[in-house]
Image (cartoon, coloured by chain):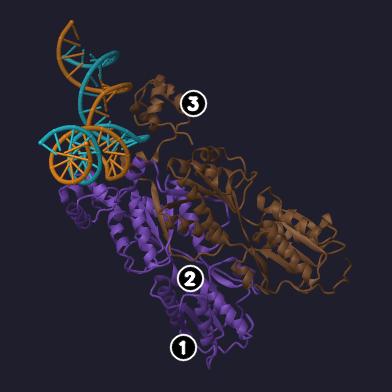
Chain colours: A purple, B brown, C orange, D cyan
Amino acid sequence: MSRTPKLSDVAQHAGVSVPTVSRVLREVRNVDPELKDRVLLSVKALGYQPNRLAKSLREQRTGIIGYLSAGDIATFHHILAQGIQNAALDHGYAVVTGHGSTLEREMMYAKIFSGYQVDGLVVIPSSTGDPYLEELAQQIPVVEVDRTFGAYSRHSVLLDNRSAVAGAVDHLVALGHRQIGLIYGNIPVSTEVERKEGFVDRMQHHGFPLRPEHLISDGFSEEGGVRAAHQLLQLGEPVTAVVVTTNEMLAGVVRAIRSLGLSIPRDLSLIGMDDTRWVQMMEPPLTVMAQPAYEMGYEAGRLLIRSIQDQDHEEAFPRVRRLPAQLIIRQSTAPPREVPSMST
Amino acid sequence: MSRTPKLSDVAQHAGVSVPTVSRVLREVRNVDPELKDRVLLSVKALGYQPNRLAKSLREQRTGIIGYLSAGDIATFHHILAQGIQNAALDHGYAVVTGHGSTLEREMMYAKIFSGYQVDGLVVIPSSTGDPYLEELAQQIPVVEVDRTFGAYSRHSVLLDNRSAVAGAVDHLVALGHRQIGLIYGNIPVSTEVERKEGFVDRMQHHGFPLRPEHLISDGFSEEGGVRAAHQLLQLGEPVTAVVVTTNEMLAGVVRAIRSLGLSIPRDLSLIGMDDTRWVQMMEPPLTVMAQPAYEMGYEAGRLLIRSIQDQDHEEAFPRVRRLPAQLIIRQSTAPPREVPSMST
DNA sequence: AAATGACAAGATAACGTTATCCGAGGTTAA
DNA sequence: TTAACCTCGGATAACGTTATCTTGTCATTT
């Protein structure tokens, strides 16, 4: 965790005074093009990033605005955020938030947070290979939550995805299902990879032959769910149950099932992910693997803060923390229409 | 917007040196009880609050952690937050978030934000009479969004609640409904007050006699919705349509309707609030008044930043900005079973 | 009783910026 | 040609804290 360069470092490197560097960067007064070039070169060479704290203190304005919400919170990610907030509050930290569903935005926020000299960062990564995030992680502790793209290279708080899916499979198997399909997202994020592997493993554990055409992967979205469901349900040898790994795709699967005129759970049993309100309100209410969103957030926050506070014996605690999902059994799962004779 | 006192002000007031005040407040070394008392008295007298910026700069740690989310966002408040985030980002501001559903937490966050010297605050107030928030509002611009408890004493970005409900009433009237009930939350927040008034006004505008027993108010929650719906639907002269003012209560109303064995829209038409996913996924999908959540958030952020940037001609722009709701007509509204003869 | 140490209060420096002040050099005008 | 100005670079001060250094007082020890 090296020291970040400051204005005086740049000034020295470029052979000019500190105010000159400041003036160049803020473009606030004319400076000799020659000096200007030297400064900009030095800035780039040293990778200088301004310290917002000092700037704010001097300028008497922070460029931070507060957002105080009394609203309800319902989705997985929002509840998770709430967990982080509370962990921070309990330990005397404040949270500055950013939402970056694209790599570009993620990089932007990583840069901004770095500027504000945050002590640490909890991140739900949007993809792999964010250079700013990597750089930031050299300087401050970073904890990944919910998912990871790398090889668990950082502290992370994740769902025990394999067990979650195994529980879903077990439940279906106990009901008598043998032909079980899986619909999952086709991006290389840990959640999808692990859920798929967990499914395959558990099916093999039960000794059921796995048909590749029963594993359908499509985009992460609701539309992906629709497409995947159509593909899966129009097979010659159809499945009697489906497990869906994301809430988003689940909505698409439900739509597709309805448009095909199939009845849940009479024609098809269904297990989804995330205990959201719509899952509870729809007819029939769905059996789902519920993620402990709040706990995941709180744990991530706590882990981060602990990591901040003893940066010396860093390696003393585990890098990956797994939290269990809970299978909530509702009315979308039932025995298949005709229970096949036990073959194994 | 007066200057907040600093350590040296306290020191002068108490007749001691600056470091002594610092030591008293941080309880970091023994100080003469006599001096200590004087310091604490002065702190209270002047209402001193430490400047986190200076502290952070000196201590080389901020006590801020970042939270970078790549998750999806779905509920009203989360989408609204996203709007604020983006407005901030577009104007070079950062957002530090707090979630305070109780007065106590709201006060806590107001204090924290104040300590971080935020330039302004967007707030969904959790109730009226938060002294810290009041004090903060003396010093920096505060914009209320979604709702207000006071008499629009601040800049605020609100839904055009009256028009929203009027639109819902008009739609039902056009379908032939005459006996229309309203279920709303019984707290004195602007959203509820205005929606109720908008309902009453519009019904009177159409010349329909308003039966007090058709206006049911209960707690803000799903359970409140259940209770209110039971009360409304077990009247001697039942309604043929119901308008519900909050998404939370709406879920309760739907549950109650189901438990009473009534069919939507055959037995009862239903219009709710907020175009959430469950509303779209349930059977039948509900007709709702959709709030422009993102736009409300963005507008609040923009208004706040404008307000920060010209604190001189503050009064130049309107204090209350209303955004229109959009009535999304789905399958929960239909003509009443027997259309009564047009009486007016 | 003088010397040593413990303690606490104030003075001073430092965190990393930006704003203000000062002076050297060049340009313009009378 | 010299005085007045303008321009731009560097030195210095300031933002509000906390850490370090200095000094003075009082208690303890031999």
- Mark 3 or mark 1, which is nearer to you? 3
User: Label 2: few (<14), some or many (≥20) within 10 Å?
Assistant: many
For the residues tagged 1 and 2, is the chain the same?
Answer: yes
| Numbered tag placed on residue B45 in the rendering | 3
Q: Chain of mark 2?
A: A
| Numbered tag placed on residue A164 in the rendering | 2
- Mark 2 or mark 3, which is nearer to you? 3
Residue at image point 33% right, 28% down: B19
Q: Secondary structure at mark 3?
A: helix
Could you give the CA–CA distance between mark 2 and mark 3, rounded to whole angstroms?
Answer: 57 Å
Q: Secondary structure at mark 2?
A: helix
Question: D9 left or right of B102?
Answer: left
Q: Chain of mark 3?
A: B
User: Label 3: few (<14), some or many (≥20) within 10 Å?
Assistant: few
Disc 3 residue type (three-letter) = Ala
Residue A114, given in percent of the width and then of the height, sits at 33, 54
Residue B35, given in percent of the width and then of the height, sits at 39, 21
- Residue of label 1: A213
Q: Is residue A34 above or below residue D19?
A: below
- Determine contact: label 3, label 1, CB under 8 Å: no
Disc 2 residue type (three-letter) = Ala
Q: Secondary structure at mark 1?
A: helix
For the residues tagged 2 and 3, is the chain the same?
Answer: no
Could you give the CA–CA distance between mark 3 and mark 1, rounded to whole angstroms?
Answer: 74 Å
Disc 1 residue type (three-letter) = Glu
